[in-house]
Amino acid sequence: MPSLVLDMALVLPYNRVGSGNTKMDSQPKVGAVIVAAGSSRRMDGRDKIFALLGGKTVLARVVDTFQGCSSVNRIVIVLSEPNLEQGRHLVAEEGWSKVGICPGGKRRQDSVVAGLSRLQGCDWVVIHDGARPLITEDLINQGLTEARETGAAAAAVPVTDTVKVASGDRIVHETPPRQNLWAVQTPQVFRFDIIVEAYRKAKDEVTDDASPVEKLGYRVKLYMGSYDNIKITTPDDLALAEVLWQKHGR
């Protein structure tokens, strides 16, 4: 993992969760990490981030939203090594003024850390999957607002299906109350020092950025995401995203 050295002049004004002082200052610097270094294994040979959605690539749809969000000062797109050149070409073609690119790692968390290493000096970080193209500025800004309470916030939606907990033999062991279950999405927003500390100490592989933060004892605030904020994993997801894109008249 890339080494991150915290600027203590940045960290000290922000006390840890529970101290009562987690509010942003009047002009916080906000960075965004767009994680787009996945392998697209379930896309039948297509690279999902460069697939077209409404005439533009999925990645461009994501970055356009962050570029247009006045709350975000800097953006890092994390790409796999084979996609770096195509990514640089896209940045130049689109003329995004806030955007830089860096190579990712083997695991998602390695890619996030690579992106964070390019955002030192930021007070807050918004982490988003490059395969969720229906992100809106409202979801970004709401996350930044909600994160003030605890230093960490994640978009999520209530689970609508009944969920069963089963062992390896698929025998049901538990049916947790549905009203307590949320499906977590991105964006996820963190105070910079919190997310850096979390990934420094993370030993196991994680599937979302809030998990290592939770393990350190920080409280993560869930806020209402959107059922339209889908992640493209398969060709069917891409087809659904196209329908949703047209539905919103974008």
Image (tube, grey):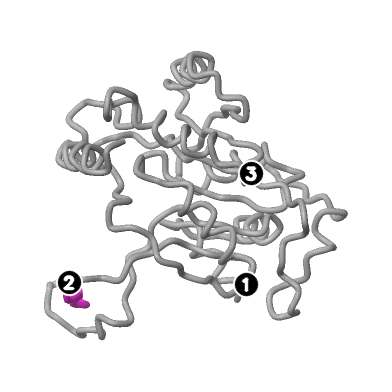
Q: Amino acid at mark 3?
A: Gly
Q: Is residue 127 left or right of residue 242?
A: right
107 is higher (above) or lower (below) than 180: above
Q: Secondary structure at mark 1?
A: helix
Identify the element where label 2 is drawn: loop
Q: Is residue 103 magenta?
A: no
Local packing at callout 3 (Cα closer than 10 Å; few below 14, some 14-19, many 20+) is: many
Q: What secondary structure characterizes most of the magenta part?
A: loop
Residue 60 in the image: state x and y as whole percent: 41, 28
Tell me, for residue 161, which label it has, or none.
2
Q: Between residue 83 and residue 119, name the one nearer to us.
A: 119
Mark 2–mark 1 Cα distance, whole angstroms, equals 29 Å
Q: Could you say where residue 95 lies in the image, as x and y percent from the top left?
A: 55, 18
- Identified at 40% across, 66% down, the residue is 224
Q: Residue 56 — which label?
A: none
Give the residue at mark 1. Answer: 150
In this rendering, would 173 be left or right of 38? left
Q: Is residue 233 left or right of residue 149?
A: left
Q: Nearer the viewer, residue 202 or 248?
A: 248
Tell me which segment is drawn in magenta: 161-167
